[in-house]
């Protein structure tokens, strides 16, 4: 049994130490992921706390959870979206459309270490041009290391849709990258 399985088994039995271990293991991941949906730190910490309280209250039903990280990310996303639903309605944004901002930090990007500041800035500009769902798929697959089946479940879409979103995102990134590289090269020649 892996360590996550062991922690979940202990949590099902009411072990508060296992609950604390789960919180310590996933709090930062949840915070970073949730910060893409809301910049309101108070709302975010409340949502994370609600997710863990709900987990504790429903610990006896944990047999269906095979991937705790995926479960917690999904629960947090749903909680944030549910609480910010009123704001979306007031702004006239469709319920199916939600904000997902993609910001780069030293912890989140290995690419940042490999690329010069100019290339990282160019990549940020390119990713900002992608629709929210494409940004989210890129983040979940490449930064959270979730497989497409987990991403599909988390986003409540078909697995093929994840592949389609990834493919389209990567095609657009490549296209934008080439366009901006040609533009930089051309402007350097002038």
Image (cartoon, grey):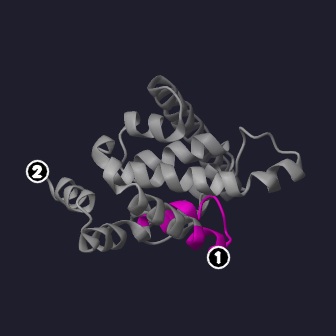
Q: Residue at x 56, y 31 (%)?
A: 168
Q: To which residue does mark 2 refer?
A: 1
Q: Are circles 2 and 1 on residues that touch, CB within 8 Å?
A: no
Q: Which mark is residue 118?
A: none
Q: CA distance from mark 2 to mark 1?
A: 36 Å
Q: Residue at x 36, y 70 (%)?
A: 23
Q: Residue at x 46, y 65 (%)?
A: 53
In front: 58, or 98?
58
Q: Residue at x 63, y 50 (%)?
A: 126
Which quarter of the figure has residue 146?
top left
- In the displayed structure, 171 sits above or below 22; it is above
Q: Main secondary structure of the magenta part?
A: helix
> In the displayed structure, does residue 87 sit left or right of residue 142?
right
Q: Which residues are magenta?
A: 29-46
Give coordinates of residue 51: x percent, y percent.
49, 61
Q: To which residue does mark 1 refer?
A: 42
- Label 1: element kind: helix
- In the displayed structure, 48 sits above or below 186; it is below
> In the displayed structure, does residue 84 sit left or right of residue 9?
right
> In the displayed structure, does residue 154 sit left or right of residue 131?
left
Q: Earlier in the sequence, mark 2 or mark 1?
A: 2
How would you rate the neighbour count of disc 2 (Cα within 10 Å): few for under 14, some for 14-19, many for 20 or more? Answer: few
- In the displayed structure, 168 sits above or below 91; it is above
């Amino acid at each position: 049994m892996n360590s996550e399985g062991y922690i979940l088994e202990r949590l099902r039995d009411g072990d508060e130490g296992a609950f604390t271990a789960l919180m310590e293991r996933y709090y930062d991941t949840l915070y970073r992921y949730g910060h893409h949906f809301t910049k309101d730190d108070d709302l975010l910490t409340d949502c994370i706390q609600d997710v863990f309280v709900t987990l504790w209250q429903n610990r006896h039903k944990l047999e269906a959870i095979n991937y705790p990280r995926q479960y917690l990310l999904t629960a947090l996303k749903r909680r944030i979206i549910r609480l910010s639903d009123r704001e979306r309605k007031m702004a006239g944004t469709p319920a199916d459309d939600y904000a997902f901002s993609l910001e780069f930090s030293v912890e989140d990007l290995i690419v940042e270490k490999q690329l010069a500041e100019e290339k990282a800035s160019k990549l940020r500009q390119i990713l900002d041009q992608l629709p929210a769902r494409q940004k989210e798929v890129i983040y979940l697959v490449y930064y959270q290391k979730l497989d497409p089946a987990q991403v599909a479940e988390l986003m409540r879409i078909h697995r093929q849709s994840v592949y389609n979103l990834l493919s389209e995102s990567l095609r657009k990134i490549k296209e934008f990258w080439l366009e901006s590289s040609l533009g930089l090269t051309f402007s350097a020649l002038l």
